[in-house]
Image (spheres, rainbow, N blue to C red):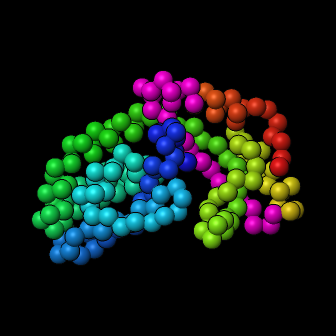
Amino acid sequence: MDKHSAGHATDRLIWTGDNIGLDGGEKPVIIGLMDSSGRRQFVSLEQALAMAKRIDQQSGYPRLSETLPAVAANGYLCPVDLAAWRAAEDRIAALMYDSAQDLDVAFWLVAEDRVEDGRRVRGVPLSPKFATEEQCREAAVEIKATKPDAYLVRHTICFHWNSPEDIMERSKLLDEIRCGEPCHG
């Protein structure tokens, strides 16, 4: 999960799909988003652009930074969406630049998908955070004896270089990852 907005995990949105460019600019863009609790919502392009800072970098940023500019340049946005894009274009470009200034921390862990409270939850951690894939694979062998659906997940957490709180959180996470030999559980 992205800690770019540390303390606001429920504010983070995952871009689950869209119809950008599919209707040749005849129909408005609809974007699917999901919050961290698994609740889905469909929003207009204008609404998504207003929430761009909350959208997960891996799921939504390629659509914002690459797809939208290309679709707009080729005339595949309806007039309302094109106006929304033009109004937000500079702000989105600045946001993309900011995200490139983030400090990433990547780690591996063993996880499984579960159904909790009637909702499917993906990538539930079964192991502590490990710094390397090799350590995680060793732990997975042990964990799979009791959890056959376990699998490996690589997480990247982004911290903004200009935020002291993020830098402190990043240090704590790196200490946790580098704690030595993994303890399985």
Picture coordinates of residue 127 (x, y %)? 76, 49
Nearer to the camera, 73 or 146: 146
Is residue 39 something one can see in this rendering?
yes
Q: Residue at x 20, y 55 (%)?
A: 85
Q: Give the magenta part as a residue range.
A: 147-169
Q: Position of residue 182 (x, y in %)?
A: 81, 40
Give the x, y percent position of residue 19: 31, 71
In the picture shown, does residue 72 fall above or below 21? Answer: above
Residue occupying the point 41% across, 33% down: 101
User: Of 54 and 147, which appears nearest the observer?
Assistant: 54
Residue 20 at least partly seen: no
As drawn, which residue projects farthest toward the front? Answer: 117
Using the image, determine if residue 39 lies above or below residue 22.
above
Q: Is residue 67 above or below residue 99?
A: below
In this rendering, would 114 be left or right of 104? right
The total of numbered circles placed on residues is 0
**Location of residue 42 (image quadrant):** bottom left
Q: Relative to 141, is 7 on the left or the right?
A: left
- 91 relative position to 175: left or right: left
Of 170 and 93, nearer the camera is 170
Which residue appears at 64% of the width and 58% of the height? 123
